[in-house]
Image: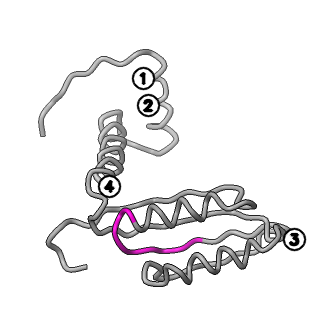
Amino acid sequence: MQRVTITLDDALLTAIDERVVSHGYQGRSEAVRDLLRAGLLQTGCEDDPDGACVATLSYVYDHGTRDLSKRLNGAFHDHHDLTLSTLHVHLDEGKCMEVSVLKGSVSEVSQLARHVMAERGVRHGSAQIIPLPAGEDH
C-alpha cells in the first residue's frame, strides 16, 4: 500500500468520522478506501455501457395505483432475459416492495431500472449495478 495525503474541509472530515463510527470501521483509511471503491465501481459502469453486470433493483410502490402492477409485470416480461429472480413483499395494506436480481449489459439493466422507478405509483427505487470483469465466464 501507498500513503496518500489529502486535504479535506471540516464538514467532510466530520462526515467521514461519523461513518467510521456508524459502520464500525477500524479507522478513517478503511472508510475512505470503501467510499473510493464504491465511487470507482459506479463510474466503471458508466464507462462501459455494453459491459456485463449483475444488479439489484429494489422499489416500493402503491399497489392501488391504477394498472401499476400490470405495467410493472409487463416491463419485466418484456425484459425476461434480464431477470434472474424477484422477491415481492406486502409492507402494509397499500404498499408493496419488490427486489429483482438482474443480469445483462449495463445499458439494458440501467434502462429497465430507470423505467421501473419512473412509473407513476413507484415511491422509492434504487438500483445497485455491479460490473462483471471482462473476460470471465458469466
Amino acid residing under circle 3? Glu
Q: In which quarter of the image is residue 132?
A: bottom left
Tag 1–tag 3 contact (CB < 8 Å): no
Which residue is disc 2 drawn over?
Answer: 16
Q: Measure the C-alpha gap from mark 2 to mark 3.
A: 39 Å
Query: Along the line of sight, which residue is nearer the eye, 129 or 64?
Result: 64
x, y percentage for residue 114? 54, 59
Which residue is disc 3 drawn over?
Answer: 93
Which comes sooner in the sequence, label 4 or label 3? 4
Query: Along the line of sight, which residue is nearer the eye, 32 or 68?
Result: 68
Query: Along the line of sight, which residue is nearer the eye, 16 or 26?
Result: 16
Q: In which quarter of the image is residue 12?
A: top left
* Dot 1 alpha-carbon crowd within 10 angstroms: few under 14, some 14 to 19, many 20 or more: few
Q: Measure the C-alpha gap from mark 4 to mark 2.
A: 25 Å
In front: label 4 or label 3: 4
Which comes sooner in the sequence, label 1 or label 3? 1
Which residue is disc 4 drawn over?
Answer: 45
Which secondary structure type mostly characterizes the magenta part of the structure?
A: strand
In front: label 4 or label 2: 4
Q: Measure the C-alpha gap from mark 1 to mark 4.
A: 28 Å
Q: Measure the C-alpha gap from mark 4 to mark 3.
A: 37 Å
* Magenta span: 99-107
